[in-house]
Amino acid sequence: MSGITLVQYLRAQENITPGATGEFSSLMNEVLVAAKLVSREVNRAGIGEDIIGLTGEVNVQGEEVQKLDHYANETFIKILSQSGKVCAIGSEENETAVLVPKEQQTSGKYVFMMDPLDGSSNIDVNVGIGTIFAVYKKISSGDTVTDEDLLQKADRQVGAGYILYGSSTMFVYTTGNGVHGFTLDPAIGEFYLSHPDLKIPSRGPYYSINEGSVSLWNDKQKSLVQYFKETDEETGRPYRLRYIGTLVSDFHRTLLKGGIFMYPGDCKNPNGKLRFAFEAAPLAFIVEQAGGKASDGKSNIYTQSPTELHQRIPLFIGSKEDVELAESKLR
Ligand code: P6P
């Protein structure tokens, strides 16, 4: 397969970035190694040693931990905490951030936030699952990591991306210079540039939401979804419903084809289910760079800070016109 590899692309981006020390490239090279290890296990799930199924543990979210969840979380933490580039790792699977103290040679200047394996409910049924990550710089003075470092505004991200373990394994990321997609050639274990400079369509044709929760929505949310179902040629309605149940997969389709993904708050969970730091903020950076928008239904997520590490937030993300229409109807 010809074309530029992710490793070559990272180096090329570093060479045109003023003041780049190579540390970010080095961090991303560790991330892609962890991604390849997880991809291998995901693609072997069900073969040989028993990697699918439950560990019997329950995580900080109160969710049953799948063996692949555990493997992915441990793999990213092990590789990144030994990289020498990271001082803290926040994970959806861990109640508190994993700290890499300054005195340890393997500490570094970046703060890494991740959902190590998103879409766990789909692992055993061979539907796409993914890893989502965000990279910030440590900003607090002194050697220790504080909440100032862990609860940063989404627009302070220096990098964000996701790995989609789907029909092929894709690595999609941004550092603020557009969004670029790479596809893994498992035969040689290299990611090749396959989707340069991704831009999201300005609107439609899909809406994506779990309609099974309709009885929990408020009236404005109900009428918003009803709007997408009405027939109106001028606005390309009715939209078509697509819901995979893995955020990374639903977001990736939205990024490539256009439309809106919604995980609203409801009467049981006013802030919805998805997490600010590990899911909404990184995808907000990516979608902004692709010309789209991410909102909590009222305001842009990209300019918000989390109040706590595992804060949940309603998510309306995708084509700018569709997200702004949703905000206008939800106001
Ligand atoms: P529901 C997967 O468990 C996940 O965290 C996201 O990947 C996905 O978008 C969402 O939950 C699906 O939730 O309530 O529709 O099953």
Image (tube, rainbow, N blue to C red):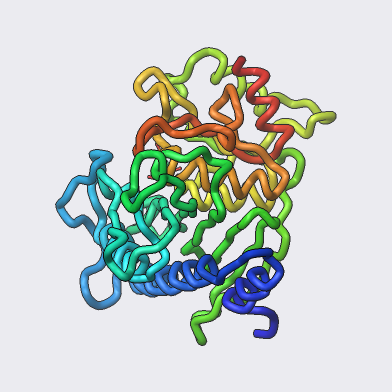
Most extreme residue toward the left is 56
Residue drawn at x 43%, y 34% as measured from the top left: 306
Residue 219: x, y in percent? 53, 13
Question: Is residue 203 shown above or below 269?
Answer: below
Residue drawn at x 37%, y 66% as measured from the top left: 80
The quadrant in which the C terminus is found is top right
Residue 300: x, y in percent? 60, 31
Give the left or right position of residue 305, taking residue 15 as reference.
Answer: left
Question: Who is closer to the viewer here, 37 or 242?
Answer: 37
Q: Toward which corner of the image does residue 12 lie, by quadrant?
A: bottom right
Question: Who is closer to the viewer here, 6 or 120?
Answer: 6
Give the left or right position of residue 53, taking residue 20 as reference.
Answer: left
Residue drawn at x 65%, y 38% as measured from the top left: 293
Residue drawn at x 34%, y 53% as measured from the top left: 143
Q: Quadrant of ligand 1?
A: top left
Most extreme residue toward the right is 234
Q: Toward which corner of the image does residue 288 lie, by quadrant?
A: top right
The quadrant in which the N terminus is found is bottom right
Residue 323: x, y in percent? 66, 31
Question: Who is closer to the viewer here, 87 or 68?
Answer: 87
Give the left or right position of residue 248, taking residue 11 as reference.
Answer: left
Question: Is residue 212 shown above or below 99?
Answer: above
